[in-house]
Image (cartoon, rainbow, N blue to C red):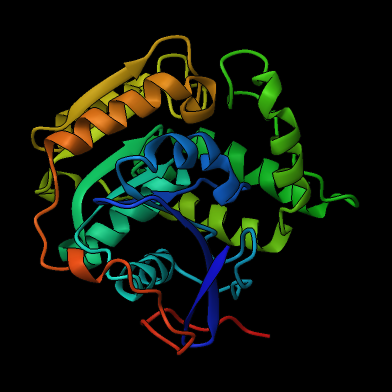
Amino acid sequence: MEVVRANGLEIAYERVGEGPPLVLVHGAAVDSRMWGPQLAALADEFTVVAWDEPGAGRSSDVPGDFTLADYADCLAALIDALDLGPAHVAGLSWGGTVAQELYRHRPELIATLLLVDTYAGWKGSLPEQEVRARVEALRQMVAAADHLFDPTLPGLFAGDPPAEFVPLLEAMAADVRPNSMRTALLVMAEADQRDLLPRIAVPTLLIWGELDGRSPLSVAREFEDAVPDAELVVIPGAGHVSNLEAPEQFNDAVREFCRAHAPHTAQAAKRLRRPSDADQGSCRPASS
């Protein structure tokens, strides 16, 4: 793992490979490790960068008043620091919401969007009753004495989690910081990005698990209708974490789309430069 410092906040990331930049933005209650199959498979053709969002993995904690725009600013700071833009930006679930917000504020950093089993915010994609139920479940989890997050939360997988990834899921769950996760998911609960979707003007790929129980295929259809010229790939038999349940199909879809929409940038010659440890970007510092 490497670290970029943005105004005092440490953002950890992993970078592998060389080629057009592909930035991977994970979901809530996990970290960059969830992208293991993609880091391994796509590094032969792309510079693949997977961050630990603020509050996850090896990145700094977030203050309780962090906003969706703050998460997007941190992602922009990472892309700026590594001279990656314009990049392919892929976000799964909550990570897709962050990726959309990055497009709202810094569209010049994005060559294409790959939105995976995601939402236009919970408020923007789910019935109000469902949002309330998820917020209440979150509050109960944070209030529990053990603060344990269930890595096999109902709806995450179409069936049982893939056996080879259970140790990884358990390790990421053990590292969840309840207060940081609560901040992210409460932001998610209030987010409504439906106004943004018709204004997305970069090539957009939607990847959805056919049996996603967290963000149903009906949500994918809403994205398909709202985002101009969006392409939808449905992965048969997969649930919400399609990159782990069906990594080969997932990677093939990503590779084909990114090949078809190569970024045009003058920054390619700079991408081998490693960032300095100096403070960079506009991301707000976390409180101590």
Quadrant containing the N terminus is bottom right
Q: Where residue 252 sits: x, y (%)?
A: 32, 24
Closest to the observer, 254 or 272: 272
Count of numbered labels shown in the rendering: 0
Residue placed at 49% from the left, 85% from the top?
277
Residue placed at 39% from the left, 65% from the top?
75
7 with respect to 166 (left or right):
left
Closest to the observer, 56 or 35: 35
- Say whether residue 150 is visible: no
Closest to the observer, 280 or 227: 280
In this view, 210 is above or below 26 = above
Q: Where residue 189 sits: x, y (%)?
A: 49, 49
Q: Where residue 279 sits: x, y (%)?
A: 45, 88
208 with respect to 178 (left or right):
left
Closest to the observer, 133 or 69: 69
78 with respect to 149 (left or right):
left
In this view, 253 is above or below 132 = above
Residue placed at 43% from the left, 40% from the top?
92
Residue placed at 34% from the left, 70% from the top?
82
- Rendered image quadrant of residue 257: top left
Q: Where residue 228 sits: x, y (%)?
A: 9, 37
